[in-house]
Image (cartoon, rainbow, N blue to C red):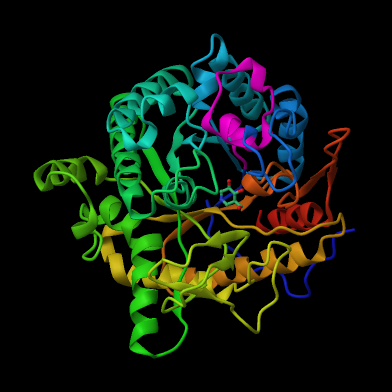
Amino acid sequence: MARMATNPIPQFPAGFLWGVSTSAHQIEGAVEEREPSVWDAFTDGPGRIKDGSTAAVACDHYHRYREDVALLRELGVGAYRFSVSWPRVLSPGGLDFYDRLVDELGTAGVRPVPTLFHWDLPWSVEEAGGWLNRDTAERFAEYVAVVVERLGDRVSRWITLNEPAEHTLLGHALGTHAPGRQLMFDALPAAHHQLLAHGLAVRALRAAGATDIGIANSHGPAWPASDDPADLEAAGFYDLLLNRLFADPVLLGQYPEGIAELMPGDAEDVAADLKVIAEPLDWYGINYYAPTKVGAPQGTEIEFGGFTLPAELPFSVREIEGYPVTDFGWPVVPEALTELLTSFRDHYGDRLPPVVITENGCSYEGLDDQERITFLDGHLRALHRALEAGVDVRGYFVWSLLDNFEWAEGYARRFGLVHVNFETLERTPKASYGWLREVLRAQG
Ligand code: IFM
C-alpha cells in the first residue's frame, strides 16, 4: 500500500505537465520486427551486459502497449514520454506501431511526447560511420521529417535527442555502452554531430509546423572534492564535459572555453554548424539523477555509477558521503536539483527557455518501494523550491513507468513505478505508483 508523506507536496502551478518516461529499446522488444540497432550488436558481444540478458523481449511493450497505456491513464499523468525507434521506422510498416500507440494515448487522454533518438542508432547507419560521420546528422533529419509527417497531426510536443552526453561518454569515449567505441577525447565529433542532428531536427520539425520542441539533456552539479586548486580545476572540467558541452551550443550557440579548443574540424564549419545547433527551442529538458563529487586525477581506475572510469581521465570521481544511495549506488540528493536549476537560470539568464524535468527517478528492488516514494517526494519538494526561487519549470517526468532493460546493467536495476516480471511479463503497480497517483489527484 502506498503511504502518503505526512506533508502534502506543495501545489504546482496550473498547467504544470506531469508525466512518466520510457524509451523504445528498453521496453519494446519485438526486435525481429525492426532493423537491427547498435544496441543489438553491442549486446551480442561477450560480457557487455552484466546479467547476460538482451532486450529482445524486454517488457514486450510492442505487443502490450494497450495494457501500458491503461496504466498511464489509471496513474493520472497528463503526458507520456516514449521514444521512437529509428530502426523500427526503417522497417516496412514500422511507423504503424507509433500510429497505434499515439491513437491509444489520445483515447486515454494522455499527451504523447516522443523522443526521436534515445541511443538506438540503426546498425546500417553505424556501419556508415555512425555519429562520427557528419552525414548521420542529415540522415537523422530525414528520418525526423518522415516521423513528423506521419504523427504530427496528433503529436504536438517533440524531443529531439536523449542525453547526447551519456551517448558520447559511455558509447563513444569509454565503450561501456553501444556502439562500444573507446575513443576518449577523440569522441568529441560524436557529440558535435549529435548536436548538429538536434539542430537539423528542430528545423525539420518547424518546417512541418511543430511549435513545441525541446531536447532532453542530462545535467547535474559537479561538486569539487575540496578547495584545493587541483580539485577545483578538475571539477570545472567535469562540469564542462557533462553540462556546458551540451547546454552552451544549444542555448548560446557556442562551445565553452576549454572545449572549443578540443573540437576538431575547420573552425568556420563548426561556427556554421553552431548556428543550426542553436535553433531556438520552446523549452529545455533536463534529466537529473545526482550530483557528482569530482577531484584531481588519482592515477587509478574508478568504479562510478556502475562503470569503471579509466585512470588517464583528467579528473577523478569521489564518493559523496552522508546521503542515502539507490541500489545503483547513486547518492540521493534532492537539494542538488534546486541547485542545478537555479545555477542554470543564473548562468544562462534569458537564453534559458522554460525548463521541463524530462527524467528523474531511482532504482530500487521490491513492490513496497518506500525508498522510491521518499526519493520522489524529496525531488518534487526540491523542484518546487526552484519554482519559488523563480526558475520557470513547466513539467516533471518520472523515469520510469516500467522496470526495463537498463542498458549495460540488463534487468538488474529496477527504475519502474510498475514492477515487471521478466519471466511472465506481468505488470504489478508498486507502492510508488499508488503514491504518485494520489499526488497527481491532489494536484488536480
Ligand atoms: O535508463 C536510463 C535512460 O535510458 C536514460 N537516462 C538515465 C536512465 C537511468 O539510467
Q: Residue furthest top?
A: 92
Query: Can residue 344 be seen in the rendering of this structure?
Result: no
Instruction: Using the image as rendered, state which of residue 395 and residue 82 is in the foreground.
Output: 82
Residue 286 percent across, percent down from the top left: 47, 56
Q: In the rendered structure, does residue 37 fall within the stretch colored magenta?
A: yes
Instruction: Using the image as rendered, state which of residue 255 and residue 357 is in the foreground.
Output: 255
Instruction: Using the image as rendered, state which of residue 117 and residue 189 is in the foreground.
Output: 189
Could you tell whether 27 is left or right of 133 in the image?
right
Residue under the point 64% across and 32% down = 44
Q: Is residue 303 above or below residue 432?
A: below
Residue 362 percent across, percent down from the top left: 68, 59
Residue under the point 19% across and 41% down = 273
Range covered by the magenta-colored residues: 22-43
Could you tell whether 206 is left or right of 238 in the image?
left
Residue 352 percent across, percent down from the top left: 32, 59
Could you tell whether 158 is left or right of 73 in the image?
left
Query: Can residue 128 be seen in the rendering of this structure?
Result: yes
Residue 383 percent across, percent down from the top left: 54, 67
